[in-house]
Each structure stands twice: as structure tokens, then as C-alpha cells.
Image (tube, helix red, strand yellow):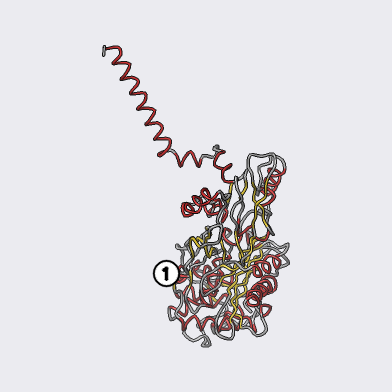
């Protein structure tokens, strides 16, 4: 071969080699990035080329799919009772992507998950039209309805948990939105509905999942954690023995007196009466006497300062790590920088009800194939033990007094033992705005089992500036949720 031909052959060989390298780079190295590129419509077109699998509650679909017209997306997502279930499902939109369960379990719902490979192959062989798998939740339709309807026009949230397993039974947030209104890709109706829901256009922020993503000052409901710390660290061991708690009480290193609300008997009150009347002086002094480290240890055992994944991410609730003695006192009554999600406070009630054992919260029971074969099933896991069984039962007795004859009487259920704690959290500069009304509770049956623990927060309403507002606004909602769970098990 003469020299010019050899050069041309070498050059052509290099071109072929470059082409092969480029081809392999695109197929194997860049494949994921290209697939996930927001400008790659092929992926989203494929995602909506067949009906999505469904999200299931109590054996029934709360989602669906329907054919579209005039679009290269063949199917779009539909929702049953969309506003009620939006905090659970999130949304799947051809134009705006997906969130929450619709996003986390997208591979199962579209049928593209590797665990469905055999099923997809079988469908290709048999000629059956492909479809997505299903996400079976732990939710109770009755509990969710009670929570959503109880909140009504009020702004707030509800979280309910099965204390023995950690299964989430209700997760409601209001105001809410209907994911069906922007499930398509229309530049008209879908875009208009989406724009209307954005916080800059809607200050009520209906797309915010308040049960998981909003942290509120927990107010007096945090006193349950402080009572647990007092029992666990042997500051007080008898719920009916007097505490060393003067009224008025001046916070350490200050001249500031910590006030109680109204004329309530808080001087040297027992733990039982201190929780019943919600004595700031007693629990503030407990926090100061125990100190930052012991309070922090107990709070973190309940889940504070850690994100939860259920599998949707819940914001971390906060118990401050850097505090002086006065700040520790304030934090111990749910003020200063203490902040909690409704899920977190439901976890507190759940741990107390479950004799001191906190189970890891979750809301997906299993993933299934289109023909309902199980792909993956959740196993309940212990998260921590914030209290011993003995101390948990002492705290149960104290919380049950709150409902029997304290500020939580509106949560009473005939024939059922209910424990609870009301709370009113300050809101705004110098508490200038309406406070947040809280209630956390659990229900116990005659056999000693506890099927449900609940936390409710109401951001607005005709709340008074005392703990009774928690009992008046939030406790009735918690009662209805607990009753719905109990009735559904009969």
C-alpha cells in the first residue's frame, strides 16, 4: 500500500474509533444524564404512553389515568378526592413533573422499575399492553376523611400514626389543592391552574404539605417531652408528688419571671397537675434543673433534630443545641427556637402510647406488580426508646388526666381511654398574631392496645391566648380521627 493510501486508511480508522468511543460514551456514560435532562421529551412521552399504576388506600385506588387528545402524551393522571389526598400522593403532571409518592415511586407506577423487568418481558411476549405497578399505603380512608373535614376551611394539619407499627394512618393539610387540575400539559388550563397555586400568587400556599414540611412552635404540647425527661432522668419519679416549683419563678441568671396563664394552681404542683393545668413555671424549671444536655438527649430520642423519610421527606423538628439556662427553660415549654412538624408531635404521642418504644413512621405498606403480586413489603422497625415502659405508663396516666378533667376534655370518647395534651404556641413578634392551637393524643382500648396517636395543629381561627384554644379548636378534630380509626377496626 502506498503512503497516501496508508494515511487515508489510518485517518478513516481513527474516525471509526472516535465514532465508537463517542457512541459508547453516549450510551453508557451519559445515558442517565440524557434520560434525566428536562429537555428530553422522549422520557416524559414514554412515562405517559400507558396508564400509570395506582396509589391504593384500604384496597381502593385513589388515583387513575385517562386518555388525552391532541397531545403526544397518551394518558394523564387523575385523582379521586384530590385535595384530601394531595398531601399523600403529591402530583404527577406532564408539564410540571412529580412530587411525593408520585415521584418517589415513579419507577413502580410507570412500570420502568428494574424489579418489573420480568413482568415487562412477559407482557411483550404475550402482547399484553404494559402498565405500571401499584403503591399500597398504610393510610385509613376514614381517618383521612375525618382529618380533612375536621380542618375544613381552617389552615392547619393532622398526622395520625399506629403506635405499635409506626404506620401512618392520616396525613392531612389545609388549604389543599387538586392535582388533577394541572396533570396535563396544556399551556392554557394546566398552566393557569398551576400559576394560581404558587405561593407568590396565593399567600395561603396550598401546595405546602403542612403535616411534613412546616415546623411550628409546639407550645405546651412539648411539655410531654419535658415530663418524659423529668421521669427518665429521675428528677421526679412520682407523678403525684409535689415538685420544687415556686410560683412566681424567676429564670436562672435573669430577673425575668416566667408567667403562667391565668389563675392556676402551679406552686409546687405535681407532674400530674402541672400537665393538667399546663404550668409554665413547673416545666420551665424542670428544663433548667435538668440542663440542656439531658433535655436534648430526650428530645432527640423522640426524633427531634432528624429528618424523617416516610418515604416522603419530613423536615427535621428542632430542639436547640446551643442554649443558656433561661433559653433551656423556654425551650422546655415549647418556646424559644423549639419547632416541630405535626408528624413529629404525633411521634411523641405514639412513643408514650406504645409504652416508651418509638416505631419508625412509614406510609407505604407494599409495592405490587400490575396483577398485585408483591414486589416489596415494609417491615416495621423500632426507631428508639425515649422512655422505659414504667415511665411511659406513668406519663400515660398523667396525659389521661388532662383529657378526663383538664384542658383536653373535648377529646373524650365514650368507652375509650384517651390521653392528650393541649397547646397554644405564640405567633408573630411579641405574640402579636393569633396563636397556633395544638392537640396531641392517643387512644387506648380495653385490651390495653393503642390503635392510634394523633397530632393536630390549627394555624388560625378564633383562638384564645391560653391552652383551652388547643382543646377547643384542635381536640375535637383529634377525637374524630381517633374515633374513625377505632370504628374502622370493629
Q: Quadrant of residue 464?
A: bottom right
- Nearer to me, 212 or 422: 212
Dot 1 corresponds to which residue?
Answer: 293
Residue 384 image offset from top left, x and y in percent: 44, 71
The quadrant where residue 261 appears: bottom right
Residue 467 seen in the current view: no
Vertical side of 41 occupied by 375: above or below: below
**Residue 238: % across, % down:** 49, 86
Could you tell me which secondary element the residue under label 1 belongs to?
helix
101, 219: nearer the viewer: 101
Q: Looking at the figure, which quarter contains the C terminus?
A: bottom right
x, y (%) of residue 120? Answer: 51, 51
Which of the 4 image quadrants contains residue 385?
bottom left
Number of marks present in the image shown: 1
Camera sees residue 449: yes
Quarter holding the N terminus? top left
150 or 216, nearer to the observer: 150
Q: Residue at x 62, y 52 (%)?
A: 91
Q: Is residue 343 left or right of residue 412?
A: left
Amino acid at each position: 500500500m502506498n503512503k497516501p493510501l496508508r494515511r487515508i486508511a489510518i485517518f478513516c480508522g481513527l474516525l471509526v474509533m472516535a465514532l465508537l468511543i463517542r457512541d459508547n460514551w453516549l450510551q453508557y456514560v451519559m445515558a442517565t444524564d440524557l434520560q434525566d435532562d428536562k429537555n428530553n421529551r422522549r422520557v416524559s412521552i414514554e412515562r405517559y404512553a400507558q396508564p400509570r399504576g395506582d396509589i391504593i388506600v384500604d384496597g381502593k385506588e385513589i388515583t387513575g389515568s385517562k386518555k388525552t387528545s391532541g397531545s403526544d402524551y397518551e394518558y394523564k393522571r387523575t385523582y379521586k378526592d384530590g385535595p384530601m389526598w394531595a398531601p399523600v400522593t403529591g402530583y404527577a403532571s406532564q408539564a410540571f413533573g412529580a412530587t411525593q409518592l408520585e415521584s418517589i415511586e415513579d419507577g413502580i407506577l410507570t412500570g420502568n422499575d428494574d424489579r418489573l423487568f420480568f413482568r415487562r418481558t412477559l407482557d411483550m411476549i404475550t402482547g399484553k399492553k404494559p402498565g405500571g405497578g401499584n403503591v399500597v399505603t398504610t393510610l385509613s380512608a376514614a381517618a383521612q376523611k375525618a382529618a380533612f373535614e375536621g380542618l375544613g376551611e381552617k389552615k392547619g394539619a393532622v398526622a395520625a400514626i399506629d403506635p405499635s407499627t409506626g404506620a401512618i394512618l392520616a396525613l392531612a393539610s389545609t388549604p389543599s389543592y387538586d392535582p388533577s387540575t394541572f396533570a396535563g400539559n396544556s399551556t392554557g388550563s394546566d398552566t393557569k391552574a398551576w400559576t394560581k397555586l404558587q405561593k407568590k400568587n396565593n399567600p395561603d400556599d396550598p401546595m405546602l404539605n403542612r403535616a411534613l414540611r412546616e415546623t411550628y412552635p409546639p407550645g405546651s404540647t412539648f411539655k410531654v417531652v419535658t415530663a418524659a425527661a423529668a421521669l427518665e432522668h429521675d428528677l421526679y419519679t412520682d407523678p403525684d408528688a409535689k415538685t420544687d416549683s415556686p410560683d412566681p419563678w424567676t429564670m436562672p441568671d435573669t430577673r425575668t419571671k416566667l408567667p403562667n396563664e391565668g389563675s392556676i394552681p402551679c406552686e409546687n404542683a405535681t407532674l400530674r397537675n402541672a400537665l393538667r393545668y399546663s404550668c409554665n413555671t413547673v416545666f420551665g424549671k424542670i428544663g433548667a434543673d435538668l440542663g440542656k444536655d439531658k433535655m436534648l438527649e430526650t428530645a432527640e430520642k423522640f426524633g427531634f433534630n432528624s429528618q424523617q423519610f416516610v418515604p416522603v421527606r419530613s423536615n427535621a423538628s428542632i430542639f436547640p443545641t446551643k442554649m443558656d439556662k433561661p433559653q433551656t427553660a423556654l425551650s422546655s415549654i415549647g418556646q424559644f427556637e423549639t419547632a416541630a412538624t405535626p408528624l413529629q408531635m404525633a411521634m411523641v404521642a405514639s412513643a408514650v402510647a406504645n409504652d416508651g418504644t418509638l416505631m419508625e413512621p412509614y406510609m407505604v405498606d407494599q409495592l405490587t406488580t400490575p396483577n398485585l403480586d408483591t414486589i416489596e413489603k415494609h417491615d416495621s422497625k423500632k426507631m428508639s426508646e425515649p422512655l422505659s415502659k414504667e415511665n411511659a405508663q406513668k406519663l400515660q396516666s398523667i396525659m389521661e388526666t388532662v383529657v378526663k378533667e383538664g384542658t383536653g376534655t373535648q377529646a373524650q370518647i365514650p368507652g375509650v381511654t384517651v390521653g392528650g395534651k393541649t397547646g397554644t404556641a405564640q405567633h408573630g413578634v411579641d405574640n402579636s398574631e393569633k396563636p397556633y392551637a395544638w392537640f396531641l393524643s392517643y387512644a387506648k382500648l380495653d385490651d390495653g392496645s393503642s390503635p392510634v396517636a394523633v397530632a393536630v395543629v390549627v394555624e388560625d381561627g378564633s383562638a384564645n391566648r391560653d391552652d383551652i384554644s388547643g382543646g377547643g379548636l384542635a381536640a375535637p378534630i383529634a377525637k374524630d380521627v381517633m374515633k374513625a380509626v377505632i370504628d374502622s377496626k370493629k
